[in-house]
Amino acid sequence: MSGLNREHAAKRSKLLAARARVPGHVVYRPFATETVVLNLETGTYHGLNPTGGRMLEVLEREERVRDAIASLADEYGTEQSRVEEDVCDFCNDLLERGLIEIHLNGRH
């Protein structure tokens, strides 16, 4: 495994054990066709498709990202490895936009 791949695997492993939470400066509301997310600090609205909205809800509910992946895989009847890829990419995207916080110790 190359150094870059080891680094990616280590980051993913930390994310899976972490807790993802929506910070106080972000609010969201699910609608029939999308979930609207507002960053109150920037005033920027973001729209999530129904799957993204559901992922956000489950990430908020579960203790760790790994637990959210298991829940979503069960709910959608798909392989955990596929859901893991999607959820990790989703978390990284939301993190870059300031829409979630990642707590590496698993506690808020």
Image (cartoon, rainbow, N blue to C red):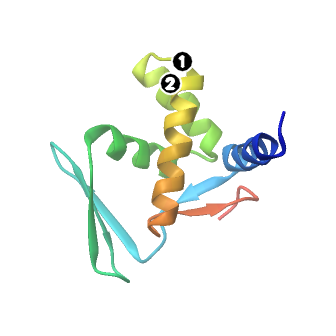
Q: Which residue is mark 1?
A: 79
- Mark 1: which amino acid? Glu
Secondary structure at numbered mark 2: helix
CA gap, disc 2 and disc 1: 6 Å
Would residue 25 appear left or right of 43 to someone viewing this image?
right
Q: Is residue 12 above or below residue 105?
A: above
Dividing the picture into quarters, in which one does residue 103 lie? bottom right
Q: Is residue 78 above or below residue 35?
A: above
Secondary structure at numbered mark 1: loop
Crowd tier of the residue under label 2, counting other residues whose Cα lies within 10 Å: few below 14, some 14–19, many 20 or above: some
Crowd tier of the residue under label 1, counting other residues whose Cα lies within 10 Å: few below 14, some 14–19, many 20 or above: few
- On the image, the x and y values in percent for residue 64 come to 64, 46
Looking at the image, which residue is at 41% across and 77% down?
Answer: 25
Q: Is residue 40 above or below residue 51?
A: below
Foreground: disc 2 or disc 1: 1
- On the image, the x and y values in percent for residue 38 come to 30, 69
Frontmost residue, 4 versus 25: 4
Looking at the image, which residue is at 28% across and 80% down?
Answer: 43
- On the image, the x and y values in percent for residue 107 come to 70, 60
Q: Which residue is mark 2?
A: 73
- Mark 2: which amino acid? Ala
Pick the quarter of the image with the C terminus.
Answer: bottom right
Dividing the picture into quarters, in which one does residue 50 lie? top left
Q: Earlier in the sequence, mark 2 or mark 1?
A: 2
Asked whether disc 2 touches disc 1, contact meaning CB atoms under 8 Å apart, the reply is yes
